[in-house]
Image (cartoon, rainbow, N blue to C red):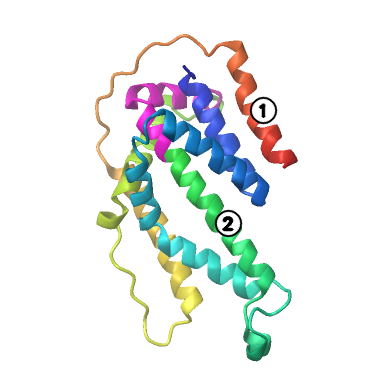
């Protein structure tokens, strides 16, 4: 079984790789996630799809930015300079696809790791931050609360409203920023629950090769 510390390393590697991934890397990521979900008989896939649906405002933000701010051949020549670009369309689809894969990966981590084990793993990664005066235990618990808040986006954020006369792109960006702020505020002010953190052995040395292999695969594709 993969150690929780390594699971977080894999998620971080995937997030970094998907940030600039093209279609071959996205296909690899999708294949890996399908295999992992299949191994769990697709448990948690419904929650991942529900979370993905709640992030649709972010997809719209990505689409607007890439479609109209990427130079290239117009998608609809009849619209002339106001037309979105073909290159922007492909880039927007890539970025939305990367976000969907990342949502599925986060949900897989939450479904396959107990809260106590996840807290212990985050605390392990946060230990070097002690030199900056941060408490690893408290930081880890706040991060877990942020992850717990994500599935409740619909409760935390009201339906979007576009003020009359406001630029649509600006309004969408403001709504996306407000969504992030509300989730972080919810985690910051939520009472710290009591969580039993299990004592576990450090990850086996061979498991560190897994994030390295994943990073190499995403980089070279």
Q: Is residue 153 above or below residue 38?
A: below
Predominant SS of the magenta segment: helix
Measured from the top left, where is residue 116 in percent x and y?
34, 22
Residue drawn at x 44%, y 74% as measured from the top left: 171
Callout count? 2
- Which residue is found at the position 25% from the left and 30% from the top? 193
Residue 186 visible, this orientation? yes
Q: CA distance from mark 1 to mark 2?
A: 23 Å
Instruction: Give the residues drawn in magenta, as a range.
Output: 107-129
Which quadrant: the C terminus?
A: top right
At mark 2, the secondary structure is helix
Taking the image as shown, residue 56 lies to the left or right of residue 33, namely left
Please report whichever mark, 1 or 2, sits nearer to the chain's N-terminal start: 2
Tell which of 17 and 190 is nearer to you.
Answer: 17
Q: How far from the left and from the top, in percent, is residue 74?
A: 68, 80
Q: Residue furthest top?
A: 201
Residue that numbered label 2 is attached to? 95
Give x and y (percent) for residue 52: 40, 52
x and y percent of residue 45 in the render?
A: 37, 41
**In this rendering, position of residue 16 left or right of residue 221:** left
- Residue at 47% from the left image edge and 39% from the top image edge: 105
Q: In the displayed structure, does residue 54 sit left or right of residue 210? A: left
Give the labeled residue for mark 1.
Answer: 213
The residue carrying pointer 1 sits among few (fewer than 14), some (14 to 19) or many (20 or more) residues within 10 Å by Cα, namely: few
- Residue 139, can we see it? no
């Amino acid at each position: 079984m993969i150690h929780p510390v390594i699971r977080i390393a894999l998620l971080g590697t995937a997030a970094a790789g998907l940030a600039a991934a093209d279609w071959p890397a996205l296909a690899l990521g999708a294949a890996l996630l399908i295999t992992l979900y299949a191994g769990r008989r697709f448990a948690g896939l419904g929650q991942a799809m529900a979370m993905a649906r709640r992030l649709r405002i972010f997809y719209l933000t990505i689409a607007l930015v890439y479609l109209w701010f990427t130079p290239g051949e117009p998608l609809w020549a009849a619209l002339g300079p106001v037309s979105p670009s073909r290159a922007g369309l492909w880039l927007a689809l890539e970025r939305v696809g990367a976000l969907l894969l990342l949502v599925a990966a986060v949900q897989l981590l939450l479904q396959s790791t107990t809260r106590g084990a996840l807290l212990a793993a985050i605390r392990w990664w946060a230990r070097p931050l002690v030199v900056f005066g941060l408490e690893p235990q408290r930081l880890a618990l706040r991060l877990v609360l942020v992850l717990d808040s994500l599935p409740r986006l619909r409760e935390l954020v009201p339906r979007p409203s576009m003020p009359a006369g406001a630029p649509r792109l600006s309004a969408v960006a403001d709504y996306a920023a407000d969504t992030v702020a509300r989730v972080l505020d919810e985690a910051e002010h939520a009472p710290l629950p009591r969580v039993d953190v299990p004592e576990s052995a450090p990850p086996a040395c061979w498991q560190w090769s897994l994030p390295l292999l994943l990073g190499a695969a995403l980089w070279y594709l």
